[in-house]
Image (tube, rainbow, N blue to C red):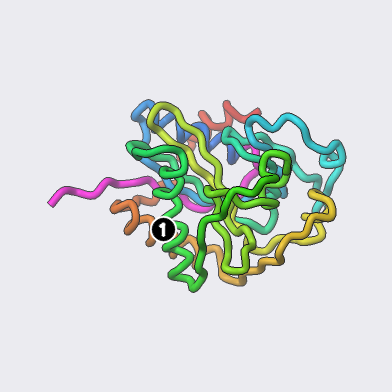
Amino acid sequence: MSRKQVWRLIPLLKASGNVQMAIDKWLLEQHHSGKQPATLRFYTWSPAAISLGYHQRQYPEAWQNLTWQGEKLDIVRRPTGGRAVLHQGDLTYSVITSGLSGNRLEVYAKICEFLIEGWRSLGVELSYGTDGRGYIHNPNCFGTATGADLILPNGAKFIGSAQMRRGDVILQHGSMRLQPDMELFAKVFGGESLSDVQFSLSLEEIMTALVGAARDCFAIEVEVQPLSELEWGEINAEVR
């Protein structure tokens, strides 16, 4: 019987968007150079932030002056593609792994399987979105659902994911909308309607279900390992 691959599981981290993106990029490079195993982690953004896709150059000037609960919203650029995402009341997952075959959508599907199975175990059925015609021109990642996104039975987009590759190493991260502030969303993206989604499950319940699903879907074991002081030093050196 072959031994299962062991992935690193980094405990939940709450930090600024720039720090979170630096961690994801650092983990990608570390795995690419063979210094770190495949990794799964979950995190939240503090302060609330708008993340831009790597190639997204234009955004409304008004975004620079938005606040939520008395704090100015961060504007952060992701290393991955896609469009703007509002990170407030959400939980972000990140998977850094390698050796997955297939085209971009096939790889998305292989990674998203643990999200579908994990949420199913919590009683939430998710399915893939279909490409909307307005995708390219819509600055809001949650305005349309592509084949890389997961939607709820009522059609509301629930998880938006984005990807980048370094050789055969893949970083895929995505935002799960748990308790979005509808008023803030309207301020960021204008009058565009957004289906109200509210989940009362605790982050611990959600992460436990998703980690269990990851074990099954990827046929792995996980080892909890927080970032060390030395690792934090390397990551902080990359924060812009």
Q: Position of residue 86 (x, y in %)?
A: 70, 49
Residue 142 or 89: which is nearer the viewer?
Answer: 142
Q: Where is residue 221 in the image (x, y as percent from the top left)?
A: 30, 53
Q: Residue at x 34, y 38 (%)?
A: 101
- As for residue 152 lying within the magenta part, the answer is no
Q: Where is residue 177 in the image (x, y as percent from the top left)?
A: 63, 59
Q: Residue 213, can we see it?
A: yes
| 100 to the left or right of 138 | left
Q: Residue at x 77, y 45 (%)?
A: 73
Q: Give the image quarter of residue 54.
A: top right
Q: Which quadrant does the C terminus fall into? A: top right
Q: Is residue 11 above or below residue 78?
A: below
Q: Which residue is drawn at 58% across and 27% down?
A: 238
Dominant SS of magenta comes to strand
Q: Is residue 184 above or below residue 55?
A: below
The stretch of residues the image draws in magenta is: 1-18
Q: Mark 1 points at which residue?
A: 211
Three-letter code, disc 1? Val
Q: Residue at x 65, y 30 (%)?
A: 55
Q: Position of residue 42 (x, y in %)?
A: 52, 51
